[in-house]
Amino acid sequence: MEAAVRKLFERYESFFNRSLGDDVDMDKVASLYASDFIAASPAGVMTGKNDDQLKQVMEQGYARYRAIGTKEMRIRDVRISPIDQHHCLAHVAWTATYAREDQPDTAIDFEVHYLVQKLDDEAKVFGWVSGDEQALLKKHGIG
């Protein structure tokens, strides 16, 4: 389980960073997710399907990240809490780096907690819990 989850997040980080540039392949990004998912943040809880609407929303999200100066997202650590032989909670510590006009780059550390399912040797995200991204960005003068 652990090797498959680490491989999943290596791909996640790679696809995310490519999407911050001009190398956006939404099919590859969508391949990280299960057919259905749940997401929770201080803004509420939502459910969704891994379909064209998800790809469109994610593409808009990457465009927004580029617009606010996101240069890269790097994983600092992945801590895995097993649930059973097919499921775990992956606590992923990220560092986001933002380019700032007339200022040094700004690095922001945050965590996202992902629900992961592993079937047939492949791990996929089926949910995540995140903090208040907008408040964190505002605190650092970004966005």
Image: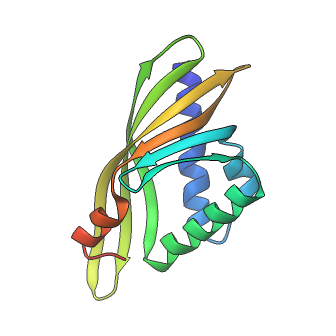
The residue positioned farthest toward the bottom in the image shown: 102
Left or right? Give the position of 32 relative to 62. right
Q: Quadrant of residue 16?
A: bottom right
> Relative to the observer, which residue lies in front, 55 or 10?
55
For the image, the number of numbered tags is 0
Left or right? Give the position of 94 relative to 5. left
Look at the image and tell me in which quarter the C terminus lies. bottom left
> Relative to the observer, which residue lies in front, 33 or 122?
33
Look at the image and tell me in which quarter the N terminus lies. top right
Type of colouring: rainbow
The residue under the point 26% across, 82% down is: 103
The answer to whether residue 28 is above or below residue 17 is above
Q: Position of residue 58 (x, y in %)?
A: 62, 61
Q: Position of residue 123 (x, y in %)?
A: 63, 29
**Residue 49 seen:** yes
The residue under the point 65% across, 42% down is: 32
The answer to whether residue 4 is above or below residue 17 is above
Q: Position of residue 51 (x, y in %)?
A: 76, 51
Q: Quadrant of residue 105?
A: bottom left
Left or right? Give the position of 35 relative to 94. right
The residue positioned farthest toward the left in the image shown: 139
Q: Position of residue 41 (x, y in %)?
A: 40, 50
Left or right? Give the position of 15 relative to 45. right
The residue under the point 64% across, 66% down is: 59
**Residue 25 seen:** no
The answer to whether residue 16 is above or below residue 79 is below
